[in-house]
Amino acid sequence: MPLTARTRVAGAPCNYGIYQADDPFVGPDELLASLATDGYTGVDSGPIGYLGTGEVLAGRLAASGIGLAGGWVDLRFADPDGFAEDLVQLDAALDVFTAVPVDDPRFAPRPTLACPGNPARMARPGTPPDLAAALPAAAWPGFAARVQQAVDRCRGRGLEPVFHYHLGTDVETEAEADRLLELTDVAVCLDTGHLMLAGGDPATALRKWAGRIGQVHLKDADLAAHRRVREAGGGLAEVVAAGGFCALGAGDVDFAGVLRGLDEIGYTGWLVIEQDAPAQGQDLGRIRADQHGNRRWLAEALR
């Protein structure tokens, strides 16, 4: 069965610079209408509540013909007390995800577990990694045990989560993702752009992680833009503003190798197209053009 028959393509609110549910740059109905027009069949939830909850969410998705691919939930895994407090927000997210009817269990929403930003690493994201701010070896067992607790909590609600390594967090590099996979049974969200800017090779990593990839974020990365920002002392917000995550095909990710590798390992599930936009000063015309172009680019790449 070809990759196109085993996957569906989703967009994401982060592509519009939407990271908070309050006062969004683009309303949810407008965003969903744009996705449907461009041929997307799914959407990441964005900040919990942005697309609505309960019957409002289910009705909004049904009216647009868009499925829910999953959504981001960051938890303070490095802080036992903070993690215990954050379980309330995990449960709230799971309430949102389980309220959406699913026509095919292969495309059920994926709770996307991640760490909140680590200020020191947010200030110096990606390669070369700021190892002085990395988790110490002694902290990993407890950290991983809390990740596993969150994973089990998701499974208790009938959902299979993934873990998203991310620039500026405690799990940023390929080696850190490897360590987490060794210590837990969580699946990984293969984010091509974040992995590349952290010094990894997505086409190679996905083969190593075959059988452990539960979600894919297709995101391009501009290594030169990232390098310029790092050399100038900028952080992750500046990387995004400088176009560090560019339109698909315009950057340095080997998407031919990635798509070929996903096909070879039999990946089944969502392909979420992401191109992070800044949270301020967005250009709606440019964003819409990029998201239309990204969908067309992927359709051609999958032929």
Image: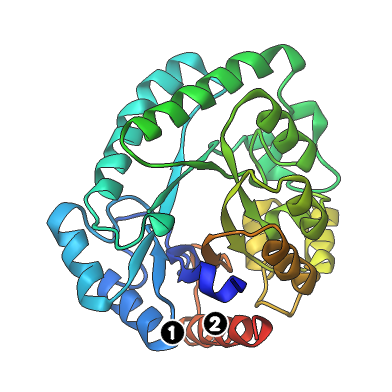
Image point 52% across, 65% down: which residue?
272
Q: Nearer the viewer, residue 202 or 45?
A: 202
Dots 1, 2 in contact, CB < 8 A:
yes
Who comes first in sequence, dot 1 or dot 2? 1
Q: Position of residue 277 (x, y in %)?
A: 55, 68
- Tell me the crowding category of disc 2: few under 14, some 14 to 19, or many 20 or more residues within 10 angstroms, Cα based: many
72 up-or-down from 68: above or below: above
Give x and y (percent) for residue 127: 83, 48
Q: Where does the image place residue 92, in percent across and percent down from the top left?
A: 27, 38
Here the colouring is rainbow
Kindly tell me whether residue 244 is visible in this rendering.
no
What residue sits 56% from the left and 83% below the top?
290
Q: Amino acid at mark 1?
A: Gly
Q: Which residue is mark 1?
A: 39
Label disc, if present, on residue 295 of the rendered structure: 2
- Gap in Å between the C-alphas at discs 1 and 2? 7 Å
Residue that appears at 21% across and 69% down: 60
Say left or right for 21 vs 271: left
Which of these two is toward me, 241 or 203?
Answer: 203
Which three-letter amino acid code belongs to the residue tagged 2? Answer: Arg
Mark 1 element type: loop
